[in-house]
Image: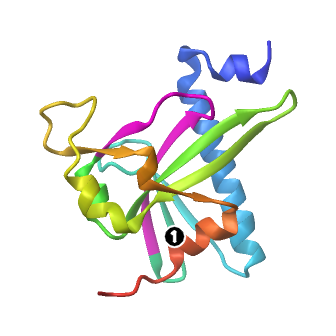
Amino acid sequence: MSIEEILNKNENSKLREALVEYMLLEKLIIAAGNKGKRLEISRSDQDLFGYDIILKIDSIVKFVQLKSTNKNSRTYYWDIQKAIISDKNSTVILIIISYTPQEVLIECRVLDESKRTEIINQRPRHRKGNDAFCSIKYGDLIKVENMEELLKLLFSKPVET
């Protein structure tokens, strides 16, 4: 049985989520280190506040909701707590998983900051009638080419308007 077959079984969804989270964190730690920065990480084992991890570089803190999907999946919408979308210190990272016979590969998309107002007004797809949630679309996320670009998007201080 291949790693892809193992991870795609429904009963292994928690294993798949943990694996891609650790892969993302490893790549972010290395990218930050290559820039002479130390990435601080705090993980949440409970999904009480809508975020999965807290990332910090210097004085900038980001609360991150992680979502994942297979590269060939037809999933294009995810329900997100409105508290994540309305907080400028929070973001969403989508981890897209693909496979080779020897390894698991990930690529990322991150919340397009210019779409926060639009997103917060999108009704949830799976939690109908729950006003605490909104729906984020695949198109609401920006593709990042590498972890250095993701770090820049996460930790560059936004221009106040």
- The residue type indicated by label 1 comes to Leu
Residue assigned mark 1: 154
Which range is magenta?
61-80
Furthest residue in direction bottom, as rendered: 160
- Above or below, 158 relative to 151: below
Out of 120 and 37, give the one closest to the viewer: 120
Q: Is residue 69 magenta?
A: yes
- Above or below, 55 relative to 80: below
Q: Residue at x 67, y 79 (%)?
A: 37
Q: Residue at x 60, y 15 (%)?
A: 9
Please tell me whether mark 1 sits on a helix, a strand or a loop.
helix
Q: Is residue 108 magenta?
A: no
Majority secondary structure of magenta residues? strand
Q: Please provide percent x and percent y for residue 17.
A: 56, 35
Q: Residue at x 51, y 70 (%)?
A: 154
Quarter of image, res 83: bottom left
Out of 74 and 68, give the one closest to the viewer: 74
Q: Is residue 120 left or right of residue 112?
A: left
Q: Residue at x 47, y 54 (%)?
A: 141
